[in-house]
Image (cartoon, rainbow, N blue to C red):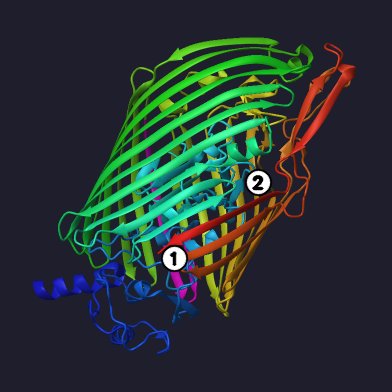
Amino acid sequence: MMRSRFRAALFCCALLLPAFAAVGVERGQPLTAALAELRRAGLRVIFSSALVAPGLRVTVEPGRGSPEELARRILAPHGLALDPVRAGLFAVVRNPGPLAAPSAMPSTVAPAAPDGVEIWASRYAVEQQTSAAFPRIRREELERLPGLNQDALRVTRFLPGTAPSPFGARAHVRGGRQDELAVYFDGVPLYEPFHFKDVHGLLGILDPGAVSSIDFFSGVFPARFGNRLSGVLDMRPRRFTGRNEHALGLSFLYSHAFTQGRLEKRPVQWLGVFRRSNLRAFAELAEWDGARPDFLDGLVRVEMEAGERSSVTLGWLVLDDDLTADLKDRTEQAVIGHRDATSWIAWRFLPDDTSEVQATVSRTERHTNRDGRLNRPGAAAGTLHDHRLFDTTTLRLEGSARLTRALQLGTGVEVYDYRSTYDLVSQGQLEPELAGALGRPATYAHELHVRPGGQAYAAYAALLLTPSGSMSVDAGLRWDAQRYGTAFRADQLSPRLALQYRADPVTTMRLSWGRLAQAQRPDELQVADGDPAFHAVQRASEGVLSVERRLPGDALLRIEAFGKRIRSPRPAYENLLDPLVLLPELEVDRVAVRPESSRAYGAELSLRWQAGARWSGWSSYAWSEVTDRFSGDDAPRSWDQRHALSTSVVWMRAPWELAANAAWHSGWPRSMLGFDATGHLAATERNGGSWPDYFSLDLRASWSRDIARGALQLYGELGNASGHDNLCCATYRLVQPGSISSLERDTSVWLPRYVLVGVIWHLP
């Protein structure tokens, strides 16, 4: 009886965790025989003897994995790859070079996706490679799209339910604020992983080539994630492809180097990426003195097998930013610097084929220095000296185990230790008439030296129940606690529930519900605005209903509806008229926004399709409404977009690849200054107007060719190709101080037309 149960458990595990499946493929075996073995294991693959010659043999250890993963792994050393002819059928083709789908890691300790995530609504995935085009987006397909700008964190702008900033890498997820998205890499929480995080977060710090797969949750997310209200971006590092890879690249944005490989005689793998900005050099060549940005980032990751069932990982991620700016005839001047570093060590152990334990310890240090002055005649003048130091140490211990054939348990505990230092000196003088219209005093001065710190704790448990082949249930409970000395103490309980029902082979319905909470961390105090206090924990309840259906002709349609209510939203500070400024805290339109509650609801439709091997694309439409409540009245949030449409198309025919992405949405709300009935200067109703609709068309072309030593890829992008003037901002000033009749207004746009060109050399 015990033996039969053991066999049944192994069979169940093989069905649910194909990464551990074994197929009779061995090193040294003829490649044609290996492919025949994979056919018998269920892989539908066709190939010609011209490509798979009789003399070719398997030259790498196949390791474990699904038949498709093994096929990709054994083909890669011969410059071959799998190409999906249609759903479930592959052809062996020549590897097109830098954009080919790489194979999975051949390590005996193969990484597996977190169990249960697929049953959650509002989950979108990007994979390094996938057996079919749906429902996941392959990473190399994403890299082909214009507008990514060598930035993995910009992936959210291509997915439904987001309102991305055209200027930076941050995004609002289903109406949430930009700080409500949690970001993880390799199981490590990343804190503000953006270049120039105080200047709109211009770019993310991760190259898309360093990422294997991404899970993006835009709604209720599993209990293993917490302390954010709107979403999760969970990224895993690029997997080893079966052969060592090295590349050098040069573009207007970056010079970069990439390396990944595995030692021949030792079970050690590495991944390294280094990028340095070229913008300062091009600014000097153009003799442009407005701004001189200089930034770099680097990633080093080493993974070592510590036995047949365990591995140890060491990682290091660094960011270094410098910006010297003198804008608009010395109106805005600043010197801004950021120095961030995150290091981690992780141990992963598989006690048996049905359980897993992982422990990760990480430490993050962030240094920020901002010194600047503002002299905007007729509006505002001031100085700012802002220096911050944040240290965060994190421990995460997670485990999962299959209890029965239909029941799996996942648990985890987390400990965070925060140390923060704020030193702020700022003062300013505002034009009295403008300040009065916006409800601000004419002068202000802040000198704050704050040292908040303490610990935060979390624990969660989740049960994944699969009572039948068509029904799955994930029920979880999360506890979070903050103990920041005498300054702040709080606890939160967050239940989460996800249901999935497969009505038929092509239709899947999902329902997710949960409570979410977000407490301010010690590094998130709004000291630069003169507000050093911890505010009440934000709490939200959200529900999502999703229907997904595969359509004839390799297409996948998904429809979702969501609703979210937020209690005790944290007070925030916004630039009401012009958000696109260098030192936002010094501007006259910097106001406190203190809603009593908030609400977001809407519906989304997305379609993904593939027509043969050459054409693919996806489109999405979203209708939503996001409001804050003030004294019983509702006002739209500043990034509320009632309608949003995005579509992308990719065409491939070696050696060319062409791509286009078009984005349109309703104009964001705006506030204005005008004159009231008595002739006094006054602000209009908050966000009572709107900017014109936004539209952007981005184009990309790339050309790849094998050369004597490796492969070469040339690419070019044209952003905002239509040259659309997307208005975003208004600056007001009094030409004659004290005279409201001399009020003038200037408007500006998000981004003009721009060009990005680059080259990548893939070394042999």
Q: Is residue 499 magenta?
A: yes
Position of residue 14 in the picture relative to residue 2 (left or right):
right
Residue annotated with mark 2: 625
Could you say which is closer to the camera, residue 685 or residue 586? Answer: 586
Q: Position of residue 238 (x, y in %)?
A: 38, 57
Numbered label attached to residue 338 = none
Please report the residue visible at 82 percent of the width from the left and 28 percent of the height from the top: 745
Reading the image, the residue beneath label 1 is: 709
Q: Residues within 10 Å of mark 2 (few under 14, many from 20)?
A: some
Q: Is residue 526 above or below residue 443?
A: below
Q: Amino acid at mark 2?
A: Glu
Measure how far apart labels 1 and 2 are at the Cα level: 54 Å
Along the line of sight, the residue nearer the viewer: 467 or 73: 73
Q: Which residues are magenta?
A: 491-510
Residue 346 image offset from top left, x and y in percent: 26, 46
**In this picture, residue 647 sits left or right of residue 307:** right
